Image (cartoon, grey):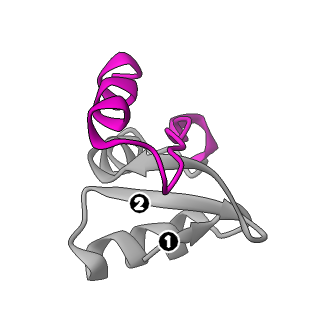
Amino acid sequence: VFVDSGQTFEEVESISLKSGHTRIPVLKGKEVIGIINTKELFALRKIGSDSWDSIIRPAVVISDSAPLLKALKKMQDKK
């Protein structure tokens, strides 16, 4: 499950509702540019906003070959 950066608010909202996930990757083409939290998306809807790009957060990128403890440390540092 992912959303594209060019999708409308309604499309992103629909994908997030159907998926049931709370965090969804955002892609621009084939590149992951960030992650959205669906709770923030629904908060935007509540205030009447139709722009969702303000809630895109940077994604933590970890190599497939990274040792587990090093990967966990990197994720905790980015929290």
Q: Nearer the viewer, residue 6 or 9?
A: 6
Looking at the rendering, in which quadrant would you find the N terminus? bottom left
Give the CA separation, mark 1 to mark 2: 6 Å
Query: Along the horizontal axis of the image, is 63 left or right of 45?
Result: right
Q: Which residue is mark 1?
A: 2
The picture places residue 35, in percent across and down from the top left corner, at 48, 48
Neighbor class of circle 2 (other Cα within 10 Å; few <14, some 14-19, many 20+) is many
The disc placed on residue 24 is: 2
Question: What's the amino acid at mark 1?
Answer: Phe
From which residue to which does the magenta span run? 52-79
Q: Earlier in the sequence, mark 1 or mark 2?
A: 1
Judged from this view, the residue extending furthest toward the left is 20
Amino acid marked by disc 2: Ile
Residue 59 forms part of the magenta stretch:
yes
Q: Which mark is residue 75?
A: none
- Percent from the top left, x then y, of residue 54? 59, 35
Give the answer, above or below, for where 4 lies relative to 76: below
**Residue at point 44% right, 48% down?**
36
Q: Residues within 10 Å of mark 1 (few under 14, many from 20)?
A: some
Q: Secondary structure at mark 1?
A: loop
Picture layout, residue 25 above or below residue 67: below
Mark 1 near mark 2, Cβ–Cβ under 8 Å?
A: yes
Q: Please state the horizontal and vertical placement of residue 78, each as a whole percent of the image.
A: 41, 22
Q: Secondary structure at mark 2?
A: strand
Q: Residue at x 25, y 56 (%)?
A: 22
Question: In the figure, is residue 8 to the left or right of 46?
Answer: right
> Is residue 8 placed above or below 22 in the rendered structure?
below
Report whether 49 appears left or right of 77.
right
5 in magenta: no
Which corner quadrant of the image does residue 40 belong to? Answer: top left
Q: In the picture shown, does residue 33 fall above or below 21?
A: above
> Dividing the picture into quarters, in which one does residue 32 lie?
bottom right
